[in-house]
Amino acid sequence: MSQVEESIQVDVPVHTAYNQWTQFESFPEFMDGVERIDQRSDTLTHWVTSVADVKREFDARITEQIPDERVAWTTVEGEAKQAGVVTFHRINDTKTKVMLQMDFDPEGLAETVGDKLGFVKRQVTGDLGRFKQFIESRGTATGAWRGEV
């Protein structure tokens, strides 16, 4: 099992950053390699990804969700094995630190080599940077789900 941990500061209030992160179907707009996410229920999402010509489909279950604090998940079925948590830390009224921690199991030689070369870490860093651009350019979230899991 491999791990990655990255964070970024975004210039929006914590509730704005959190609200956007709960809009899973918008992830393809800032996550490279994510083709589609279907929200099947409050706690179940279906992902379609394509990274380096490797297409994967999997289901992920939200295992914990606390408004303005955290969203945790684990894959439950499909071609990827991972678990993680995104936490939101209020810096002040207009700034938030978003931290992503993820455990994943590379599959096959190409993914194992890519992991050793830091591909996943660079991918996460890039995705967080694109999230920052996405939410700061809007200034508001595209929606919100404030329920707890």
Image (tube, rainbow, N blue to C red):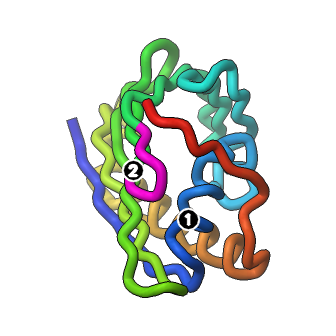
Dot label at residue 69? none
Q: Seen in the image, is 95 located left or right of residue 40?
A: left
SS assignment at label 2: strand
Camera-side residue of 60 and 115? 60
Q: Is residue 25 magenta?
A: no
Camera-side residue of 73 and 31? 73
SS assignment at label 1: helix
For the residue marked with disc 2, what is the amino acid? Answer: Arg
First in sequence: mark 2 vs mark 1: 1
Query: Can you identify the residue that label 1 sits on?
Result: 15
Q: Quadrant of residue 64?
A: top left
Query: Can you identify the residue that label 2 sits on?
Result: 70
Q: Position of residue 134 (x, y in %)?
A: 71, 71
Which residues are the magenta region?
65-69
Say which residue appears at 49% left-offset and 85% top-offset.
93
Q: Quadrant of residue 12?
A: bottom right
Q: Are marks 2 and 1 in contact (CB under 8 Å)?
A: no
Q: Quadrant of residue 69?
A: bottom left
Q: Position of residue 29 (x, y in %)?
A: 75, 57
State whether residue 110 appears in this view.
no
Q: Position of residue 27 (x, y in %)?
A: 67, 50
Say which residue appears at 68% left-offset and 50% top-offset.
144
Say which residue appears at 56% left-offset and 74% top-offset.
129
Q: Is residue 32 above or below residue 11?
A: above
**Pair 2/1: label in front:** 1
Say which residue appears at 46% left-offset and 58% top-offset.
68
Q: Quadrant of the C terminus?
A: top left
